[in-house]
Amino acid sequence: MRRRKKQKQDHPLIVQGNPKAVASEAFRTLRTNLQFTSPDREIKTILITSAAPGDGKSTVSSNLSAAWAQSGSRVLLLSCDLRRPVLHQIFGIRNTPGLTGYLTGRASLDAVIVPTSVPNLDFIPSGPVPPNPAELLQSKAMRQCFKDLRERYDVVICDGAPVIAVTDAAVVASQTDGTVLVVEAGETPKDVAAQAVQLLERAKANILGVVLNRVAGRGGSGYYYYHYHYYYSSSEAE
Ligand SMILES: Nc1ncnc2c1ncn2[C@@H]1O[C@H](COP(=O)(O)OP(=O)(O)OP(=O)(O)O)[C@@H](O)[C@H]1O
Ligand SMILES: [Mg+2]
């Protein structure tokens, strides 16, 4: 079994808890890179996913959303990981009714959107774990949800499930304008990352780039570093 690191962070939302930290700067840089990634095509909905569990998707999506909101944009963080929801814990918000409440017709969109302690940042938690996450994520209601959110916000960041284990992330990727793949430095094997890319490409995802998480820095704990790399599909690279 793969070893999972569960080190405690001082503040899971580092861009808010420690805006001067190197990691906070890295999230602001990531935001800027994504803002200018595609001048010809509006990128409004972005999925954050990775190959495997625990690679740092929720850490990246929550901090990126907060960094984006800090720049004055209206941001919505959508928890699309319906199987292992954690974002509501990071923000100290109830996990209900959430996205599943909306998708099953039990709550309106207005009822599931909650403001966070970060100005300009709203949040939709996952909601109760449903028996059929992939089905809900490819429903008409999900498409309507994206349509409405695009009108209300400048950017929608989606925290996804790992792409290899279940189809959920690929299903969401096909509905978003762009996808960012989180890769754990020195941990995610190349063939596993390649498989994740293949699954996303098959789902017609627009892969924007790769975030290298847990890059060891020189000196210090070398822990919180992030690097962003643009993604070129094999045809573009030729
Ligand atoms: N760069 C980092 N520095 C320190 N801690 C980190 C870093 N990235 C992730 N973590 C920690 O690692 C754990 C897993 O991260 P996270 O929950 O973001 O991963 P995930 O990919 O969303 O997991 P899952 O697949 O279960 O949804 C968390 O405890 C998180 O705080
Ligand atoms: Mg997660």
Image (cartoon, helix red, strand yellow):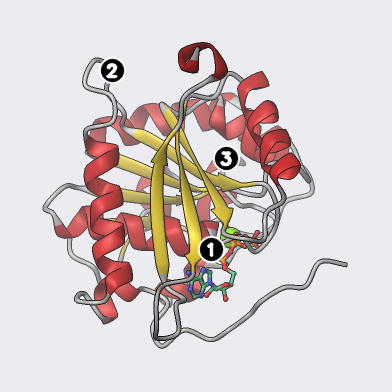
Q: Position of residue 216 (x, y in %)?
A: 48, 71
At label 3, which amino acid type do we have? Leu
| Residue pointed to by mark 2 | 41
Q: Earlier in the sequence, mark 2 or mark 1?
A: 2
Does mark 3's beta carbon lie closer than 8 Å to ligand 2? no
Q: Quadrant of residue 62?
A: bottom left
Left or right side of 92 for 141 = right
Secondary structure of the residue carrying numbered label 3: helix
At label 1, which amino acid type do we have? Thr
For discs 2 and 1, the disc positioned in front in the rendered view: 2
| Residue pointed to by mark 3 | 103
CB contact under 8 Å: marks 1 and 3: no
Question: CA gap, disc 2 to disc 1?
Answer: 34 Å
Q: Is residue 89 at least partly visible in the picture?
A: yes
Q: Position of residue 171 (x, y in %)?
A: 63, 30
Q: Earlier in the sequence, mark 3 or mark 2?
A: 2
Question: CA gap, disc 1 to disc 3?
Answer: 12 Å
